[in-house]
Amino acid sequence: MSIWIFFKIIGSLSLLIYGMKVMSEALQKMAGSQLRHILGTMTKNRFTGLLTGMFVTASVQSSTATTVMTVSFVNAGLLTLAQAISVIMGANIGTTLTAWIMSFGFSFNMADVVFPAFVVAIILIYTRRHRYIGDFLFGIAFMFFALSMLSATGKEMDLSHNQAVLDFFSSFDTQSYFSILIFLCIGTMLTFCMQSSAALMAITMVLCSSGVLPIYLGIALVLGENIGTTITSNLAALGANVQARRAAMAHLTFNVFGVIWVVICFYPFVNMVCSFVGYDPMSEHANPAILSLVLAAFHTTFNVCNTGILIWFIPQIERFVSAIVKPKKADEEEDFRLRYIGGGSIMSTPELSVLEAQKEIQLFAERIQRMFGFVRELMSIKNDADFTKLFTRIEKYESISDNMEIEIAKYLDSVSDAHLSDETKAKIRAMLREISEIESIGDSCYNIARTLNRKYNGKEDFTERQYEHLHQMFELTDDSLTQMNVMLSGRKDRLDVNRSFNIENEINNYRNQLKSQNINDVNSHEYTYAIGTMYMDIISECEKLGDYVINVVEARMGTKQREA
């Protein structure tokens, strides 16, 4: 019987975590990109950042999702670290709504209500238009069903009459700070091991509601959960960039500071929270059924008070985490390294992962334009050592371009394995097309460099007029790359593709003009056929590059690929 009860508890906790995951992902899919726009625009100061973090986290029921979005905006330069800290503070308050939902599930028997919810949810899932609402209903029904099962299992265990359990908990003096610190450490370790503060909160509510775990020790477990959940995010950020690690460290600093001051004034603070819900922790006849409400009230009061104190010290927190988390030794810019979707990227949901991939593509495009800048520079170099050094650098960039295409494509492929909205599927298809075309731009840059290398190692050189024409063509090509980067970094509804098409037309017209002129110049012996061929190879490669740019722009804007 004891093994059966153990599996019922583990199964209920698994169902609870799964229900929260389904509900959170459904809410994020329903909200779409609006949450990202809110995070990007409603963080003008620490107070709006705080409210934004609360709103987004309460909406998606996931502080991790909010933290991931926030860190990605810091990486992109849309938010400062100080603004991100205020959002994370708000996320800490927003996530307390989960405890209230659980408390509601323990206080009321929802088992009979969830079955109609399952029926409605499955109907909505099969109606294409409302399937996300169906997913949300499924998630929340799973949550309440799991909470009802946990509550029933807690009663079935009859812990209040289990002498061994009673003796274990009664061996701890609830009026001793040593006991509080022991349970705080237990809460931290269990949360870290279970990777879910919600699961430990549910267990704590079961134990407290059964009357075997005193409220003081239960609250100590909740304090430990607050530290344990930040350790997880810090470990996840180890392989990420410096801003991600600083944001995770700020989260840990915020919670550790809060736990320290609450432990110092532990008993008065807990007694105050208990008085809010009409519970007397010292009374022998107190009703343990409302202890889940006490835990939820404590969780909210703790985070609200901690935020109220620390929101005035955000600049100091920023300086503190910046001093602790130092930037890694700067690698050369041509070392292959993904910035946003590397080993430390937190793949919370596919919807958020697409945002990370889009930023990596922007970085890819910027790197390719730098590569083209090296090609322009290569044409003007006359010194052997400098030429060889820069040509080798361009070769390395071409290799990086190939690797970036493969790694981003692999990442998008892993994202596409999940259950996606139609909008996200379309974005992934567009991004796969973007990286393919950007890699082709890198190939064109390398082809131009190879032609310049052949010319440099040969006996002939371009005429002064050819150099003028090449510089002008390079200028147009660089303009098209600049405009491509503008298109990749802006919002679709604020972009104008006409500029890109106009530049491409200029490149095509200029190529046609130079092609005709080249034939005449070769016939009139202005230069040899061989040098004319290399000259036109570079011009034609620039025209191809312009076509690839247009393909990237079309993919970004969601238009069809043109006929070749």
Image: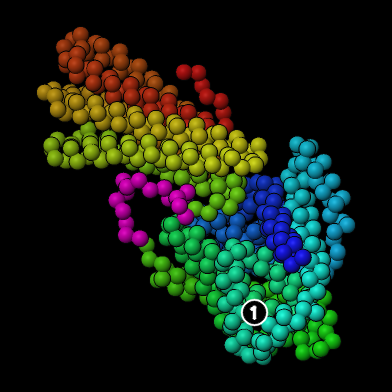
Secondary structure under badge 1?
Answer: helix
Q: What residue type is labelled 1?
A: Ala
Q: In this view, does 420 lie to the left or right of 413?
A: right
- Closest to the observer: 429 or 477? 429
As drawn, 37 above or below 559? below
Q: Please check the rendered image and state whether residue 15 is part of the magenta-colored stretch, yes or no.
A: no
Could you tell me what secondary structure mostly forms the magenta stretch? loop
Q: Is residue 234 left or right of residue 142?
A: left
What stretch of residues is rendered in magenta?
Answer: 328-344
Q: Count all numbered tags in the image, as a single digit.
A: 1
The quadrant in which the N terminus is found is bottom right
- Closest to the observer: 179 or 343? 179
Picture residue at 50% right of the left edge, 59% below the top: 236
Picture residue at 49% right of the left edge, 62% below the top: 235
Picture residue at 77% right of the left edge, 50% below the top: 138
In x, y percent, where is residue 233?
A: 53, 62
- Closest to the observer: 255 or 56? 255
In x, y percent, where is residue 255?
A: 57, 73
Res. 185 image quadrant: bottom right
Residue 51 shows up from this direction: no
The residue where tag 1 is placed is 220
Q: In this view, does 133 lie to the left or right of 222?
A: right
Q: Please check the rendered image and state whether residue 338 is part of the magenta-colored stretch, yes or no.
A: yes
As drawn, 242 above or below 553? below
Residue projecting furthest to the left: 459
Res. 511 image quadrant: top left
As drawn, 139 above or below 437? below
Picture residue at 59% right of the left edge, 40% below the top: 417
Residue projecting furthest to the top: 523
Res. 326 image quadrant: bottom left
